[in-house]
Amino acid sequence: MPISISSILKDSEYKLDQFSPEQITALESSIITKTDKNGKEVFYVKCLVRDKEIKLTPEECVRQLYLDTLVNVYDYPVSRMELEYAVKFGREVKRADIVIFDKDRTTVPYIIVELKKPKLKDGKEQLKSYCNATGAPIGVWTNGSSISYYNRKDPNYFEDIPNIPKVTQKLSEILSVRWTIQDLIKNDKLVNERKSLRDLILEMEDEVLANAGVDVFEEVFKLIFTKLYDEMESGRKQDRPLEFGNFGYTETELKENIQSLFDKAKEKWAGVFNTDEKFLLSPSHLSVCVSSLQKVKLFNSNLEVVDEAFEYLINKSSKGEKGQYFTPRYVIDMCVRMLNPTEDETMIDTASGSCGFPVHTIFYVWQKILEKKGLKKKHLFTLEKKPEECTDYVQSKVFAIDFDEKAVRVARTLNLIAGDGQTNVLHLNTLDYERWDERINDEKWQDAYMTGWQKLRKLRKEAKSNQDFNFDVLMANPPFAGDIKESRILSRYELGKNKDGKEQSKVGRDILFIERNLNFLKSGGRMAIVLPQGRFNNSSDKYIRDYIAERCRILAVVGLHGNVFKPHTGTKTSVLFVQKWDEKLCPKKDDYNIFFATMQKPSKDNSGDKIYLKETDANGETKYKLDEHGHLIVDHDLFNHDGLTQDGIAEAFAEFAKKEGLSFF
């Protein structure tokens, strides 16, 4: 029985994901087994280039497979290759894994491939040093799972390129090929190279943004905003070539093209950037960033790719300081499923961040609309023209408020896409509603937010008061760090007083949000709110629990794992689900059942990195399980992920809700 390559790679950082089963089988069938002097089996293979038997280490497995790719996919002759090529650094000599020589100058390296360092950051540094020392214009790094291609423009500037040229092609042909949206789907870097948009932003920061003297958040936001527009335009006109990319332009030409595209995007999605806003990156820095992003597909049937990148950017620039951390999207999806909103109901998030709750509510309701119409959600659903009911829902029923201006602009971008150019995301301080009128009378504010405000105003309980509203559904993760100390604000809240009814000098922000959120709901309305665990069991917080129980039926309490909000905070949290008492929808009773559940799977490790689901294939190999877009699935037990995982807490609650006869199931 032939030895399996995966058993040789076991315990190494090398993988086989980028090679075909045929390539792997061919290599396995050529393995020669020998016995060393200690009687241990040792594996060899005849090297394609050196034409002699070579010991098969994990690195050598990946090298032989990639040599096969170079010979049989890119058509490079073995005669132009050398392995372990000596690269001199003064007196020191290092060995490059694979070198392909220039066709005309046969001793000059043209392509250098690095495999020795299986981590991208180390491998890229090694590769750059080899290219700089030899003048090779093209570098490739791979560990058998991820692969990156670079064009060396000068010693400090290595540009991401979509591929390497075949033997008959010039590098300029690779760079000047104009892609359609279908090409982008096929070559999506996030799927093919197993990277996330967050990883790419980190790479760009390491390489250019950290030293570019610009606001990283603003420049990356402009890039993503522009690329979203480009993808949407090409998604709706399938024959339109994508414009966001470095297609063999000079750096100055590229900057002009990208600025022009950004100007069109600002016109389509107004109120996010000032009309005269420009890219502040230098042409060479912009060129590096565009090359990094041009092979990334931002759109799919949801907006998770962009969402994750924005979460990173906002946390980095402002959110953490205010104790307002983004809710992981799997927690949001659990809340949405448990509150089960419909297209006839209004929904708001009063501390919206980048709008996770509203956006995921939109996707959930859209799915129901499509099912009702007998339609299937397509792969690029978010960029296509949607049924009227879908855009109507976003434009008239979904609202969001946040006091952080950067978060609001991100949230507006996601909502403008979902709402086909319209959004009800407002820049307001939820708790300080007395001062809303001052904001609303500000002309600059009106330019961006007036349309949304006019719709929100119609949902007030009383025509001239901003205190009470008539929302059906509210979901929020309010900031729970820091206290409110202004007596002017505290005096407006019943929970601004202690259990004896005396005004307090300071009150936790999240406590005021509980009361404020309940005031946003009509009777019978329902809410999911993320709160620190202490609110549920501290004896000093009993008056808060009494306040809630008096006004609502407590539907459920779901304890989240302590790692959920890492790396930002290790605070233990739970989600509280309630429904306001209402004669018809939720008649008041003293004794009723409450659904309790605790998340068992951590979903993130102690460093705050997500833990992804794995599965064992037919050959007994363990691989990451992927969703329909080829993206990784977080390993949690909150709900069933599109039929690919086990039922979780959300499904158990749905059963409970039906048994209890709750109005919304």
Image (spheres, rainbow, N blue to C red):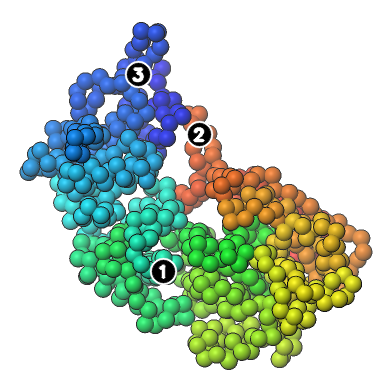
Q: Position of residue 211 (x, y in %)?
A: 35, 61
Q: Earlier in the sequence, mark 1 or mark 2?
A: 1
Residue at 58% over, 92% down: 441
Q: Within 10 Å of the Cα at label 3, are there few (<14), some (14-19), or many (20+) other Cα atoms?
A: some
Residue 167 vertical placement versus 507 (above, below): above
Q: Nearer the viewer, residue 427 or 485?
A: 485
The reply to whether dot 1 and dot 2 touch (C-beta < 8 Å) is no
Q: Nearer the viewer, residue 174 or 37?
A: 37
Q: Quadrant of the N terminus?
A: top left
Tell me if 594 is positioned left or right of 563 in this view: right
Tell me if 395 is positioned left or right of 535 in this view: left
Whole-number angstrom distance, CA of label 2 to CA of label 3: 23 Å
Whole-number angstrom distance, CA of label 3 to CA of label 1: 53 Å
To which residue does mark 3 refer?
43
Q: Earlier in the sequence, mark 2 or mark 3?
A: 3
Q: In this rendering, which labeled residue sits more in front, label 3 or label 1?
A: 1
Q: Quadrant of residue 229?
A: bottom left
Q: In this rendering, which labeled residue sits more in front, label 1 or label 2?
A: 1
The reply to whether dot 2 and dot 3 touch (C-beta < 8 Å) is no
Q: Amino acid at mark 1?
A: Asp
Question: Could you tell me which secondary element the residue under label 1 belongs to?
Answer: loop
Q: Within 10 Å of the Cα at label 2, are there few (<14), some (14-19), or many (20+) other Cα atoms?
A: few
Q: Amino acid at mark 2?
A: Thr
Q: Amino acid at mark 3?
A: Phe
To which residue does mark 1 refer?
215
Residue at 27% over, 43% down: 127
To which residue does mark 2 refer?
622
Question: Could you tell me which secondary element the residue under label 3 belongs to?
Answer: strand
Q: Within 10 Å of the Cα at label 1, are there few (<14), some (14-19), or many (20+) other Cα atoms?
A: some
